[in-house]
Amino acid sequence: AKYFLPKLNKNKTSVFAALSARVGSISDNYLGGWYSYRASKSALNMVVKNASIELSRSNKNSVIVALHPGTVDSKLSRPFQKKSKEYFSPEFSAKKLVNVIDTKTVDDNCKIFAWDNTIIPY
């Protein structure tokens, strides 16, 4: 972000998106656990919030958001997977996230979005 944000176009809407996770939401945490992972994603969400507020002062067309890709079938999720749950392929998740990014406007600055474009609270 340090090097990329200053390069965002000031004449039209430009989006910077960071890959976060729903578990980084403090108000949406009903299960506990995963302390380090949750803390790192919460910290990332705060960086997104701070950067979006700060950059909006000098670039009114900037949009900085965090994205939750859904639960993706990966090396990270495999040890915790349950047979009763469906997991996204990396390709499916990536396509969904691109669709989310493509819908963003300056009104979406400083928010966290899930793969289905729903807002996740901080």
Image (tube, helix red, strand yellow):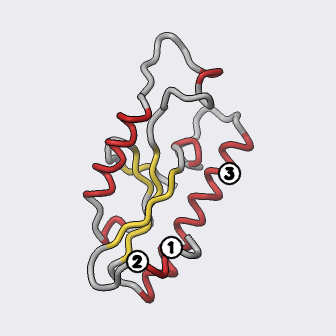
Where residue 79 appears, as percent x and y from the top left, is: 65, 21
Q: Which mark is residue 8?
A: 2
- Identify which residue is drawn at 45% across, 24% down: 87
Tell us which disc is closer to us: 3 or 1.
1
Label 3–label 1 contact, CB within 8 A: no
Where residue 38 appears, as percent x and y from the top left, is: 66, 44
Residue furthest to the right in view is 36
Tell me the residue that label 3 is attached to: 40
Q: Is residue 57 above or below residue 85?
A: below
Mark 2 secondary-structure assignment? loop
Mark pair 3, 1: CA separation: 21 Å
Label 1–label 2 contact, CB within 8 A: yes
How crowded pointer 1 is (Cα within 10 Å; few <14, some 14-19, many 20+) is rated as few
Q: Nearer the viewer, residue 12 or 115?
A: 12
Q: Is residue 69 above or below residue 16?
A: above
Where residue 48 appears, as percent x and y from the top left, is: 53, 65
How crowded pointer 3 is (Cα within 10 Å; few <14, some 14-19, many 20+) is rated as some
- Amino acid bearing label 1: Phe
Mark pair 1, 2: CA separation: 7 Å
Identify the mark nearer the N-term, 2 or 3.
Answer: 2
